[in-house]
Image (tube, rainbow, N blue to C red):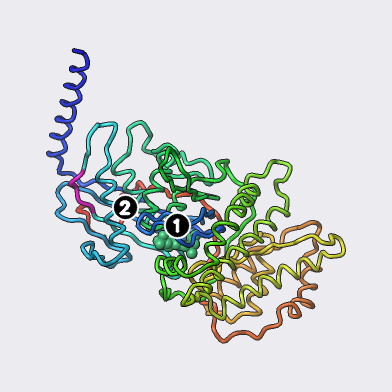
Amino acid sequence: MSSQIQIYEYINKCIYDIGNSINEDTNIYFSSCKAPVNIALIKYWGKIDENLNFPINDSLSITLDLNDLYTQTSIAMSKMFIEDRLWINDNEIDLKNCKDGKVYRVNRILYIFRSSIDWEKLCIIKKDWKIRICSKNNFPTSAGLASSASGFSAMVTCLARLFFESDKYSDNDSNVDSKYSNGLDNFFTQHKIKEFSAISRLGSGSSCRSLFGGFVKWVNYNYNNNFVSQAEPVDTTKENFLIHNMKVLILVTNASQKHIDSTKGMKLSVKTSQLLNYRSQYIVPDRMKDVEKLVLAHDEYKNCEHSFSKLCEVIMKESNQLQAVCRDTYPPIIYSNEVSDLIINFVIAYNKAFTNFFQEENAGHNKIKVAYSFDAGSNAFIFIDESHLQTFCILLEKHFMLSQSASETLTYLSRSFDLMGYNNLSKKEWNNYLEVNFSFLFNHEKLAIPIQSIILTKPGSGPIYINDPEECLLDSQGFPK
Ligand code: DP6
């Protein structure tokens, strides 16, 4: 008994000491990171609980390379700050504007971190400390390029380190060894990162998948009568074989703001689309299983082009179904435009050409080498086997109207990526074949609307911390530089 009292006394003293030291603290603490965009292969569309962002179905994504697309965020935290402040892409956002849904979500995440107990120090620490957040994207905001996913995951990544960084882990991100591992891995356990993903989910559903690299699933399950909804990596090995030769081309067909954002669109679909219900119950569960199986295929199936073809097929069907659900919504939501429709036909024609080219040797074999995917916007995400990038770009240049920047990017790509040896495929024969046959398969006039810009990227890692103060977006007083 007496020893228990001693323990309580000891704990009380610790809390008192920590409280005192915190009260005296006049420092400003900083945390900066870059977080990636992810693109869903199995789409999240619809919520069973709007407030908590519980999705109607599981989803699965690929994280894109941070070196090409990212949100960079710096957060400063101090007991001396009077109020919370937020700057996004050089504009200050009023965090007191309760009517703005995104602002509400930012405040909610801050509240969650502030209310968390630091189990190491046994107290609710930094509860009253105010925060300044500065965030920038290197790509057009709200253009269907998932800026809220990278934005919220960046915010949570920075807050995680400010509130929970543990002395146990080294303050050094150079030991991020695996290509698709995570900057957070150096500071937190996988279990903790999954918990952070659930917090990020409250900001924007799809953002929970951006806390991890490579293939990531966002799953919902019941654990001890609690509904759990969080992201986790599908494959934790160094580099998944399906990703190895994969490139992702983003064709920006409209860089302006979308006319109806995903949150509103989903709400309307849940209310009015019968197809959405059917899809979440009968289609997505099987597709999740199929894709996971492909990603985790055993050695004997690895490098098999069949897996890539299968994956491409699911990617395109999922994209089609999301657009179908949107059209099934009443009033209908239409995210595509003429250019995006043409891109779909173009990809189908390309795969058909390749299948036909091989038909005699490999009758019945599917040769899907390219897939398209669209989210809540008209920009296309093209998943392509690297060995096809050159021919695909040359044909794109020939058949689409392009802005000057898009044209320059394609010219560069056509020169940089040579068609690699593929099943003894002769580059000359394949190009000759396309020369003669492709316009029969893709028999369309060039549209007057150009593809505005093109970004080449590939799968990549989860968020990374930035330790160099020079790269911090806030100055030493916590104001945007
Ligand atoms: C079409 O995550 O932007 O990109 O949870 O309401 O913030 P909220 O929606 P958001 O939805 C994105 C949906 C999607 C498909 C996907 O990423 O799975």
Q: As rendered, which of 259 and 369 lies closer to the eye? A: 259
Q: Which of 297 and 421 is in front in this view?
A: 297
Identify which residue, 282 or 10, lies in the foreground: 282
Q: What element carries label 1?
A: helix
Residue at (54%, 77%) from the top-left corner? 451
In the figure, is residue 358 to the left or right of 394? right
Q: Name the residue under label 1.
A: 206
Q: Tell me the kind of residue under disc 1.
A: Ser
* Residue position marked by numbered label 2 in the rendering: 470
Tag 2: amino acid: Glu
Please report the residue visible at 38 percent of the width from the left and 46 percent of the height from the top: 196
Mark 1 vs 2, N-terminal side: 1
Stretch in magenta: 127-131
Mark 1 CB within 8 Å of ligand 1: yes
Looking at the picture, how far across and down is residue 474, in whole percent? Answer: 26, 56
Left or right: 11 with respect to 439? left
Based on the displayed image, in which of its 4 quarters is residue 247 positioned? bottom right
Magenta stretch containing residue 365, yes or no? no
Give me the disc on residue 397: none
Outermost residue, right direction?
360
For the stretch drawn in magenta, what is the main secondary structure?
loop
Percent x, y of residue 420? 72, 59
Q: In the rendered image, is residue 398 in sight?
A: yes
Does dot 2 land on a helix, a strand or a loop? helix
Beta carbon of the mark 2 residue lies under 8 A of ligand 1: no
Q: Is residue 128 magenta?
A: yes
Residue 2 as seen in the image, left or right of residue 316: left
Q: Is residue 148 visible?
A: no
Residue 11 lies, with reference to residue 461, above or below; the image says above
Rendered position, 192 above or below 143: above
